Image (cartoon, rainbow, N blue to C red):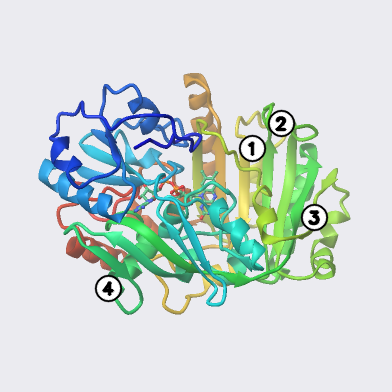
């Protein structure tokens, strides 16, 4: 059985390994995947996450092939006294720490997507990433509630909440998940829905990977043949003018448009061609669920400023994949995030003073995503991550290639946090890439309910989510 390379998804020839301090023979009996332990030549490659700043050193890395393999891993981990941490891509690996005493369960071999076009429901297996489903759904005239990156894992994104390009219209993706199949700590393969295991179903949709290993997920699709979407690029010396103009538009925008105001200092990289690679911009990105005429009217005040590059057009939903220009290759990322209340104009200036032209900021991207709309209204049958506080979601990141770079990025992120501190409204865990007080992301009732579900379904903390619910083992 071959191992899928976590970087390329290719399958280098490789045999099942047993160099472990565990009795992996006991696992092999009913297990068809691979398990790699430290010392194997491919262990380092197997343990690597998308964010290469994460130095995961798990006791073993398992690559299950199906639900039965996951059941076998759960039984094995319990016998061996190990914790289990599920991971698809490692886009949010940093908060997990070094993973000692933990078996990392990579779901990359559990691929597969089915679409029921009539019911407008997609079913994906645990290792599916967004681009596995956006194209096939788009071919059927349907859109998914994906986010900015085509290669983020659907399960990790949805268990954290999921805020995408249509978020102001449809709210969190987690509220449109209709079924979750997972293996729980007692070794059962459970199908959680509104009607079956409803508390567990509620907790999973926002409470993350703390309750079991998800093997499959089902979610709603939306009839969207086309979207008016794109980006306006302006020279970054115009950052104040453009960001203020965008910010002033926000209160008047309908829920059908979700937009981002962003400072971008693009490093010179072969995969980012001119005229964008190696330059700095202020960028407005948006997706509008409506007509070209309607979208043009909404964006007219920004267009009137004369962007250097204008990519807005009617696109099929799959065309949004590259809109945010998220990197596909693994890279070192250090980021900061905050949900923000309504900002006065001088808060934009305070943010620009530490990130914009003349600031010397090393941050590659500083973005404000417009939230509110359906993200602020409780949804029917919602999960634990129902709404987001505030009206903007700040996410800033740097890409350090050495220790000095990391120090500079940390310093710049601290300056950003100080600049927006008066408007801090909480946090959204999908965008938190470090250990944090998870309780801060929920209201008191939801937090109490989440910890109760954790105690009921995983009393020994077998499952190590990236953002824990309750005390770590
Ligand atoms: C470039 C980039 C762009 C992003 N854009 C957006 C965006 O637009 N909107 C948004 O909401 N978020 C966005 N995110 C955040 C992203 O949704 C989270 O990082 C999410 O956790 C990634 O899921 P993953 O499976 O790819 O990552 P992983 O690191 O593999 O998984 C993250 C966590 O999810 C849980 N998990 C994953 N698979 C399973 C499973 N099978 N069973 C149980 N638990 C599991 C685990 O707790 C795991 O630690 C972005 C992140 C990056 C790096």
Query: Does residue 445 appear in this view?
Result: no
Which mark's residue is nearer the viewer, 1 or 4?
4
Q: Is residue 267 left or right of residue 472?
A: right
Q: Is mark 1 on a helix, strand or loop?
A: helix
Which residue occupies 79% across, 37% down? 237
Per the model, the C-alpha gap separating discs 2 and 3 is: 29 Å
Q: Mark 2 points at which residue?
A: 358
- Whether ligand 1 has any atom under 8 Å from the Cβ at mark 3 is answered as no
Per the model, the C-alpha gap separating discs 1 and 4 is: 47 Å
Asked if 31 appears above or below 339 in the picture, the reply is: above
**Total residue callouts:** 4
Q: What element carries label 3?
A: loop
Q: Mark 3 points at which residue?
A: 312
Q: Which of marks 4 and 3 is nearer the N terminus?
A: 4
Asked if 452 appears above or below 59 in the picture, the reply is: below
Per the model, the C-alpha gap separating discs 1 and 2 is: 8 Å
């Amino acid at each position: 059985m071959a191992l899928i390379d976590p970087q390329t998804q290719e399958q280098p020839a490789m045999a099942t390994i047993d160099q472990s301090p565990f009795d992996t023979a006991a696992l092999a009996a009913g297990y068809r995947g691979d398990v790699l332990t430290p010392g194997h030549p491919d262990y380092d490659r197997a343990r690597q996450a998308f964010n290469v700043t994460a130095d995961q050193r798990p006791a073993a890395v398992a690559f299950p092939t199906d639900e039965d393999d996951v059941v076998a891993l759960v039984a094995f981990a319990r016998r061996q006294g190990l914790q289990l941490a599920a991971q698809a891509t490692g886009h949010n690996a940093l908060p997990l720490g070094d993973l000692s005493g933990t078996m990392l369960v990579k779901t990359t071999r559990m691929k597969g997507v089915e679409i029921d076009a009539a019911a407008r429901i997609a079913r994906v297996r645990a290792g599916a990433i967004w681009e596995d489903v956006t194209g096939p759904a788009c071919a059927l005239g349907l859109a998914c509630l994906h986010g900015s990156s085509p290669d983020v894992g659907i399960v990790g994104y949805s268990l954290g909440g999921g805020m995408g390009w249509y978020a102001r219209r449809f709210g969190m993706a987690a509220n449109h998940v209709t079924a979750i199949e997972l293996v729980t700590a007692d070794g059962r393969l459970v199908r959680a829905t509104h009607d079956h295991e409803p508390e567990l179903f509620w907790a999973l949709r926002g409470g993350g990977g703390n309750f079991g290993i998800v093997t499959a997920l089902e979610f709603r699709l939306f009839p969207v043949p086309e979207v008016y979407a794109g980006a306006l690029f302006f020279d970054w010396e115009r950052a104040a003018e453009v960001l203020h103009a965008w910010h002033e538009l926000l209160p008047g925008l309908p829920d059908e448009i979700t937009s981002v105001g962003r400072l971008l200092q693009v490093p010179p990289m072969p995969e980012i061609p001119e005229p964008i690679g190696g330059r700095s911009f202020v960028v407005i990105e948006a997706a509008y669920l409506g007509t070209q005429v309607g979208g043009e009217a909404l964006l007219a005040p920004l267009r009137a400023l004369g962007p250097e590059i204008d990519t807005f057009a009617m696109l099929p939903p799959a065309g949004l994949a590259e809109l945010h220009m998220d990197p596909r290759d693994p890279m070192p990322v250090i980021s900061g995030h905050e949900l923000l209340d309504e900002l006065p104009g001088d808060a934009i200036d305070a943010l620009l003073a530490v990130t914009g032209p003349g600031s010397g900021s090393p941050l590659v991207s500083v973005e404000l995503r417009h939230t509110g709309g359906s993200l602020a209204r409780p949804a029917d049958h919602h999960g634990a991550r129902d709404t987001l506080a505030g009206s903007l979601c700040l996410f800033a990141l740097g890409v350090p290639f050495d220790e000095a770079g990391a120090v500079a990025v940390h310093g710049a992120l601290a300056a950003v946090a100080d600049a927006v501190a008066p408007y801090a409204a909480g946090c959204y865990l999908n965008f938190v890439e470090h250990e944090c007080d998870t309780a801060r992301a929920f209201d008191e009732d939801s937090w109490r309910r989440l910890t109760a579900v954790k105690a009921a379904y995983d009393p020994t903390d077998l499952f190590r989510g990236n953002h824990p619910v309750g005390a770590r083992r």
